[in-house]
Image (cartoon, rainbow, N blue to C red):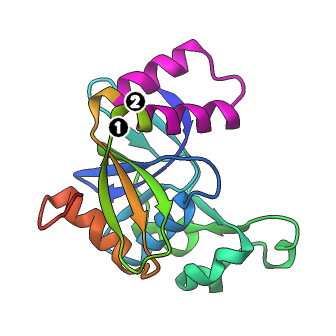
Amino acid sequence: MQYIHAGAVGTPEGGVLLVGKGGSGKSTTALTCLNSDLVYVSDDYCLVSTDPTPTALNLYNTGKVREDNIHRVPHLAPVIHNIDKLDQEKALFFLNRFMPEKLSKGFPLKAILIPRVTGEVDTTLTAAPEPAGLSALTLSTVHQLPGAGPAALQLIKRLTSQLPCYYLELGTDLAQIPQVLLALLNQEGVRID
C-alpha cells in the first residue's frame, strides 16, 4: 500500500482516483459528489494498493476546501468545523459526523481522472495517455510527500499502467460532475472525446 496525494469517489463496486496538483479541482470534485449517489473515500490523501487489484482506501473521514470555493459545495457550508479560522486555513468538514452514509472504507479503482477547470458549462471526459496520469500522480505525491521513495514510485507506475486515464474537463454546472462520473463507472451513455 502507498499513501498518495489524490481524491477518490465512486460506488461500492468501483471508483475513480482524482489526481493532480493542489488547486486542480480534486477537492471540489470529490466534495460535490457527496451530494449524489456516489460515495467518498478522499478529497486529498488516501491509501492505494495494486495487489490483487487497484484499490483506494479511506484514511481520514474529512474533507477540506479553500474558503473561496465554499460556495461550490453549499451542502457542506452549515457543517464547517473551523468557521472561525477560515482566514488562516481551509474549511474543514468532519464527514463521519454529518454524512457517515456517504463515507466508504474503500473500493476497487476503475479509472484515473485528471481534473482540469475549463470555464465551459459542461463537464466532459477526454482520453488521456498513461504518461499523463503517471506524471500527475507522481509529481503531486512526491511534492506533497517528500519521503516518497522508489517503492512509492514503483507502485504508482503499476497503478497507472493498470487503469485507463482521462482528463475530467470540469464545467461550471457542478451538478454534472457526479453524473459524468456515474456514467463512466456504469459505462452508460458516457461520451469520451
Q: Where is residue 106 in the image (x, y as percent from the top left)?
A: 38, 47
Q: Which of 93 and 91 lies nearest the eye of the viewer?
A: 91
Identify which residue is drawn at 55% across, 67% down. Answer: 95
Q: Tell me the quarter of the picture where residue 162 sits.
A: top left
Identify which residue is drawn at 50% across, 75% down. Answer: 119
Q: Distance between the residues labelled 2 and 1?
A: 5 Å
Mark drawn on residue 73: none
Which region of the structure is painted magenta? 133-160
Disc 1 crowd rating (10 Å Cα; few below 14, some 14-19, many 20+) is many
Q: Where is residue 71 in the image (x, y as percent from the top left)?
A: 62, 84
Label 2–label 1 contact, CB within 8 A:
yes
Mark drawn on residue 55: 1
With respect to residue 83, does 90 lie above or below? above
Q: Position of residue 176 (x, y in %)?
A: 34, 77
Q: Would you say the magenta stretch is mainly helix, strand or loop?
A: helix
Q: Which quarter shows the C terminus?
A: bottom left
Taking the view exactly as shown, the residue that stands out farthest to the top is 150
SS under mark 2? strand
Of callouts 2 and 1, which one flags the residue occurring earlier in the amino acid sequence? 2
Reading the image, the residue beneath label 2 is 49
Residue 68 counted in the magenta span: no
Query: Is residue 158 rendered to the left or right of residue 12?
Result: right
Q: Which of 111 and 103 lies nearest the eye of the viewer?
A: 111
